Amino acid sequence: MTDYLLLLVGTVLVNNFVLVQFLGLCPFMGVSSRTETAIGMSFATVFVMTLASLLSYLVTTYLLTPLNLEYLTTMSFILVIAVVVQFTEMVVHKTSASLYRLLGIFLPLITTNCAVLGVALLNLRLQHNFLESIIYGFGASAGFSLVLVMFSAMREKLANADVPAPFKGTAIAMITAGLMSLAFLGFTGLVKI
Amino acid sequence: MSILIAILVLGIIAGVFGALLGFASIRFKVDADPIVDQLDALLPQTQCGQCGYPGCKPYAQAVAEGEAINKCAPGGEDTIKKIADLMGVEVQPLDDSHQHSDTDNSNRPKVAFVIEEDCIGCTKCIQACPVDAIIGAAKQMHTIITDECTGCDLCVAPCPVDCIEMRDLPDTINNWQWDLTSIPVKQLD
């Protein structure tokens, strides 16, 4: 039990996918200008990543490994991710039309979010079991959500701040992200995995 | 042989997922774009056509597809704010083409006013009014119910003696707006 908890904390804080492993930077910059949108994107990503890591575990363990088809992992993971994203898009469109409009192109673009493929491939490389895979996927997306919402809150403040002209817009956002990354490096060594 | 197995396995995965998505697309089918109905509910339903669309519902449809949100003159600033909230976009001032440039405070809400001594009782303005805010009968003087008038100015054009004019609503605490830009702000470096 403690192992699983440590894995979760380690994935969310210590090995944060965005700020420490630098995966999924595109939506991190793209959807963070409004906190509401960021929260919606977070939920969608948590759903997609958890489900994708679960399904990709099942596909590798029960289909690809017994048939010696490990070379097909990347290809089948992409298939899995695309299906889960498409499914999420349908659910979001049905349940919340305004969120669907707010997320816009970024919802289908979760497919190309490298953090999703990253979590599936890392599960394989780290030889996680079924439960660990789900926790790792959930932890990675929770870490992504945490920094995305924090970052969007900061960007909303920055919109009103008196930023020097050369740093206005994306430049100051990049600098903010860098400082956040430095702050997250402070968690290094908190959990030994 | 192994290639055949690989193709078969990927085919099976794709087939299962395809069936899943097909099921989902029926299960989670969106009947009509619900955003259009929500937008339609926000619009004043005067069907005045000043936005360039034949009525409120077509304009709601157009807004949902990305048309500018600031074309509804009867709804005014209030409606624009609500639409902006719903659509998640910035509030914009009312479209320029709806602002009467002959007065300085042209952004104020207006109502129609019948100059009663000139009215010949032709009922043409009554037929034009989308909200039945004009009372009167043939060869009788007409007048406007100010509370009902949306300021759409559709009655101005049909009047043969030009006895209808658009007047500013008197200021009350409900419609008074503090025009912040009229206070000069100097930006210090």
Image (cartoon, rainbow, N blue to C red):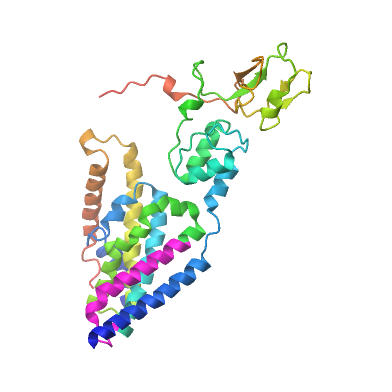
Asked if the stretch drawn in magenta spans residue A88, the answer is yes
Region rendered in magenta: A64-91
Total marks drawn?
0
Is residue B129 shown left or right of residue A124?
Answer: right
For the N terminus of chain B, the image quarter is: bottom left
Residue A160 position, x and y percent, is: 34, 37
Is residue B157 shown left or right of residue B83?
Answer: right
Quarter of the image where one finds residue B118: top right
Residue at 40% over, 74% down: B17
Residue B67 position, x and y percent, is: 46, 40
Is residue B134 shown left or right of residue A86?
Answer: right
Residue at 44% over, 70% down: B21
Where A66 sits versus B70, above or below?
below
Confirm whether residue A97 shows in the render.
yes
- Chief secondary structure of the magenta span? helix
Viewer-nearest residue: A94 or A57: A94
Quarter of the image where one finds residue B53: top right
Viewer-nearest residue: A135 or B111: B111
Confirm whether residue A2 shows in the render.
no
Quarter of the image where one finds residue B168: top right
Residue A174 position, x and y percent, is: 23, 47
